[in-house]
Image (cartoon, grey):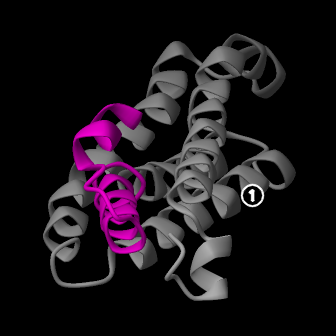
Amino acid sequence: MLFLKPSERFLSPIRIILLICSAQVLAQFGSFSVPALLPVLIDVWALTNTEAGWITSAFYLAFVGVVPLLMSLTDRVDPMRNYLFGISLIAIAALGYAWFADGLWAAVLFRALWGVGWAGTHIPGLKALGDVVERLSDFNFKTGTVGWR
């Protein structure tokens, strides 16, 4: 660590691990807040159970549909870019859901966008974490970071 440039000392492996793990925890909180609030939304938006199911399913359908693409991009594109793309989509979807969703179709749209963002935070995030820690560290921390998710 003594031979690292000042910018790399600021971005120590521990700080990067904490930053990515904190972002992932926040992404997880948001992803599961909507299903927790679904009973309230059913009453407020006068949704049927089928419509509520579509809101929940949109997230998982988008996630499953995009994972193969983002997984293959992880080896071709900088995984940190994929991860930041995913986190950005999650933030946009969360803000859009909070401010603009007022019924079924807006909720489905923002939940699907959320699912796409969530797909960009798992394997790309793990790969980005491993790459950055390996580059900035004297030791190989890959085995220690595999269980971060």
**Most frequent secondary structure within the magenta stretch:** helix
* Pick the front one: 103 or 10: 10
Measuring from the top left, give residue 136's x and y in whole percent.
42, 71
Q: Is residue 149 something one can see in this rendering?
A: no
Near mark 1 (Cα within 10 A), the count class, few <14, some 14-19 or many ≥20, is some
The residue lying at 18 percent from left, 62 percent from top is 71
Which quadrant would residue 46 be assigned to in this image? top right
Quarter of image, res 29: top right
Q: Is residue 88 magenta?
A: no
Residue 3 in percent (x, y) is at: 49, 82
Report the residue at 56% width, 34% height from top: 28
Q: Is residue 110 visible?
A: yes
Q: Position of residue 55 (x, y in %)?
A: 52, 34
Identify the residue shown where x is 67% and y is 26%: 33
- Give the residue pinned by disc 1: 96
Q: Residue 85 in the image: state x and y as whole percent.
A: 50, 72
Seen from the viewer's position, the closer of residues 104 and 78 is: 78
* Badge 1 amino acid: Gly
Q: Is residue 88 left or right of residue 58?
A: right
Lateral position of residue 127 relative to residue 125, left or right = left
Is residue 95 toward the left or the right of residue 50 in the image? Answer: right
Magenta-drawn segment? 120-149
